[in-house]
Amino acid sequence: MTRLLFLPILFISSVAMVGCEGAKTTGKVTFDGALVDNGTIVFIPSDGKGASVSAPIKNGDFAIAVPGGSYKVSVTAEKMMQSSSTIKGAPDEMRNYIPARYQGSSSELTATVDGKPLTFDLKPDADKKKK
């Protein structure tokens, strides 16, 4: 009899713990139409309450456990780029190529986490577009 009472309590406790930590949310991130190979995505609560949660972006995909609600979303990603040094023959360097408007708590990206997959298609700054 005690076992029969224990199982429902265990199940309810498990569901409650998942609700506090957040459900798994998945999605894709592209920049200028191409998958972001390696980067980081951060979900920042829009109301300023609670902790930010981050996850790696691999081949454009991410998976993160985050509670449902509204978020600011920050994305960073690095790749080898031509050196910004004025020294002739300077080696290439790893640099973040995501525009600042998609980064930090002032990011213009927003998302409502509701269990559905999310897609973020980031655009380059107008003055940096390829010609």
Image: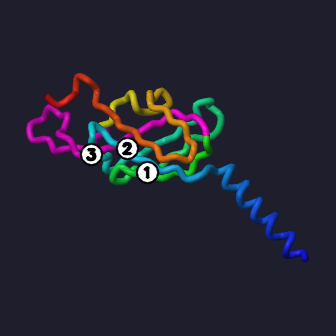
The quarter holding residue 52 reads: top right
Q: Is the magenta stretch mostly helix, strand or loop?
A: strand
- Image quadrant in which you'd find residue 14: bottom right
> Which percent across, then down, holds residue 31?
30, 39
* Up-down relation of residue 37 to residue 126 (above or below): below
* Label number found at residue 29: 2
Image point (39%, 51%), residue name: 61
Amino acid type at image mark 3: Lys
Secondary element type, mark 3: strand
Closer to the eye: label 1 or 3: 1
Q: Residue at x 62, y 31 (%)?
A: 48
Give the residue type at disc 2: Val
Q: What stretch is highlighted in magenta?
A: 69-96
The residue to which callout 3 is attached is 79
Q: Distance between the residues labelled 2 and 1?
A: 8 Å
Up-down: is 48 above or below 30? above
Q: In the structure shown, which secondary structural element does the residue marked by tag 2 occupy?
A: strand
What's the mark number on residue 102?
A: none
Residue lying at the far left in this picture: please name it. Answer: 88
Would you say the residues marked 2 and 1 are in contact, meaning their CB atoms lie under 8 Å apart? yes
Judge whether 10 appears above or below 77 on screen: below
Kindly report the distance in space between the C-alpha atoms of the residues bearing marks 3 and 2: 15 Å
Element type where label 1 sits in the image: strand
Determine the residue positioned at 52% across, 40% down. Answer: 43
Q: Give the crowd class for mark 1: few <14, some 14-19, many >=20 residues within 10 Å.
A: many
Q: Name the residue under label 1.
A: 62
Quadrant of image for the C terminus: top left
- Let me know if residue 89 is in the magenta part: yes
What residue is drawn where x is 51% and y is 33%?
72
**Residue located farthest toward the right when viewing the structure as drawn:** 1
